[in-house]
Image (tube, rainbow, N blue to C red):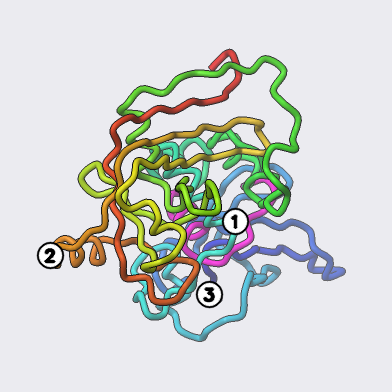
Amino acid sequence: MRAQLGDQLVVESPATGATRRDGEIVGLHHEDGTPPYDVRWSDTDEVTLVFPGPDTHIRHIEPRSGRAGEQAGGASGGMPPDRAPNPGDVGRRIAAERRRQGLARAETARRAKMAPEYLAYLEERPAEPGLASLIRLADALGTTVAALRGGGADLPSGQGHALLHPQLQDLGPDECRARLSTHGVGRVAVSTPDGPAVLPVNYEVVDDAIAFRTMPGSTPAAAVGADVAFEVDHVNEIMSQGWSVLAVGPARVVTDPDEVRRLTDRAHTEPWAGGEREMWVSIRPRSLTGRRISPADQ
């Protein structure tokens, strides 16, 4: 018998073969996935050490690969990069929310009363955690199960109900820089011959300067040589909370080869719009302001 984190342990009735008890495997004690296992039982939500008997079998959460190293990868974290599967949408949301709040994985697991290895498994593999695990994670992260599952992700922002007692707070310069530096898509406002335009761009923050790639002659390239506004935000539609940061300053085209190379090497993503976008534009903020909407008791 071999298992991986997130598999279901099923105990059947020896007389009828019906499921008598089941639980989620949240801890492995051997790298090859052999027993014993730490199991969180669905009927009591308690975790116990289990040595499976003849009336027990494993219900796998995904097709088996046949390689023991991959089966144990969720526990050890040692899966080679070229074989590691991409995390599922739920895992990506969990990891993104945890990092946004500056929480370590171990601390989040402690709050959610689960093994750190299992949280690593959820964040790094295309797993579908049980409802009990999602409820604990949502509580630990101060969000909702619906948000972790992506509820409302395809709806326009701002259609949710406002908070009963909201408060609008100004963000200080340090907090503005911190929120700006963790975002990947922002909006640049420029003046064009046809009037003002606001466009989304992938960007980087390097040495307190905002930099994005575009093409010569494109609308974002109109920022060069002018004062522009650059905005990033985050809206939690489920929780009716959010923040925004606005940077204003002069934009210039980056021409120094070493600086271009450094920006390219440090870029976290390729431009989503695709195409040849080798022109780097840098904005040095002259002013940086931000606001946050949250419940009045926070």
Q: Amino acid at mark 2?
A: Asp
Residue position marked by numbered label 1 in the rendering: 90
Residue position marked by numbered label 3 in the rendering: 2
- The answer to whether residue 72 is above or below residue 237 is below
Which residue is depicted at the point 54% across and 57% down? 91
Q: CA distance from mark 1 to mark 3?
A: 25 Å
What secondary structure is marked by label 2?
A: helix
Whether pointer 2 and pointer 1 mark residues with C-beta atoms closer than 8 Å, the reply is no
> Any magenta on residue 13?
no
Task: Evaluate whether residue 34 shows in this view.
Answer: no
| 51 and 179: which is toward the camera | 179
Which residue is depicted at the point 41% across and 80% down? 83
- Circle 1 residues within 10 Å: few <14, some 14–19, many ≥20: many
N-terminal-most mark, 1 or 3: 3
Residue position marked by numbered label 2 in the rendering: 258
Q: CA distance from mark 3 to mark 2?
A: 52 Å
| 164 and 192: which is toward the camera | 192
Q: Amino acid at mark 3?
A: Arg
Q: Indicate left or right for 261 with 267 as reference.
A: left
Magenta stretch: helix, strand or loop mostly: helix
**Where does the magenta region start and end?**
116-133
> Any magenta on residue 129?
yes
* The N terminus sits in image quarter: bottom right
Q: Indicate left or right for 30 with 278 as reference.
A: right
What secondary structure is marked by label 1?
A: helix
Q: Position of residue 198 (x, y in %)?
A: 52, 49
| 283 and 143: which is toward the camera | 283
To which quarter of the image does residue 17 belong?
bottom right
Task: Evaluate whether residue 128 shows in this view.
Answer: yes
Q: Amino acid at mark 1?
A: Val
- The answer to whether residue 160 is above or below residue 262 is above
